[in-house]
Image: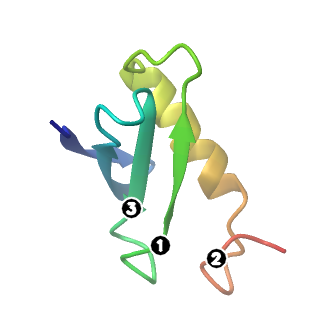
């Protein structure tokens, strides 16, 4: 069963969904407050454990640090 949650980091909102039993430790982050509400990223933990909230937040901050403020997408 897939679990989901909403996380707010530095004023930005992400819906986070666990991949499920077929890919344990992987999470999909959808940036719902961004310019494109379907834009986001996926992160995976190799030990297949659920990450702590601080690890979710760190992944989100890392993603946001790569965003071009003019385009709202990752820099190329």
Neighbours of disc 3 within 10 Å: few (<14), some (14-19), many (20+): many
* Labelled disc at residue 71: none
Q: Secondary structure at mark 1?
A: loop
Locate the N terminus by quadrant. Answer: top left
- Give me the C-alpha separation between circle 3 and circle 1: 6 Å
Query: What's the residue at 54%, 34% (across, down)?
Result: 44
Of circles 2 and 1, which is in front?
1
Reading the chain from its start, which is encountered first: label 2 or label 1? 1
Q: Is residue 61 above or below residue 24?
A: below
In the image, taking residue 51 as reference, residue 46 lies left or right, namely right
Please state which of residues 68 and 38 is positioned toward the viewer in this rendering.
38
Q: Secondary structure at mark 3?
A: strand
Please say whether residue 51 is visible from this viewpoint: yes
Residue 4 on image: x %, y %: 20, 43
- Most extreme residue toward the right, as rendered? 76
- Give me the C-alpha separation between circle 2 and circle 3: 13 Å
Mark 2 — residue? 73
Residue 47 on image: x %, y %: 54, 13
Q: Secondary structure at mark 2?
A: loop
Locate the C terminus by quadrant. Answer: bottom right
Q: Is residue 48 above or below residue 61?
A: above
Instruction: Tell me whether circle 2 and circle 1 mark residues in contact (CB < 8 Å).
Output: yes
Mark 3 — residue? 30
Query: What's the residue at 68%, 85% (across, down)?
Result: 70
Reading the chain from its start, which is encountered first: label 3 or label 1? 3
């Amino acid at each position: 069963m897939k679990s989901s949650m909403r996380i707010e980091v530095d004023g930005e909102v992400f819906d986070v969904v666990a991949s499920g039993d077929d890919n344990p430790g992987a999470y999909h982050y959808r940036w719902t407050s961004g310019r494109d509400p379907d834009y986001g990223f996926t992160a995976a933990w190799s030990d297949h454990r659920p990450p702590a909230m601080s690890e979710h937040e760190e992944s989100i901050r890392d993603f946001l640090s790569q965003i071009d403020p003019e385009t709202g997408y990752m820099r190329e």
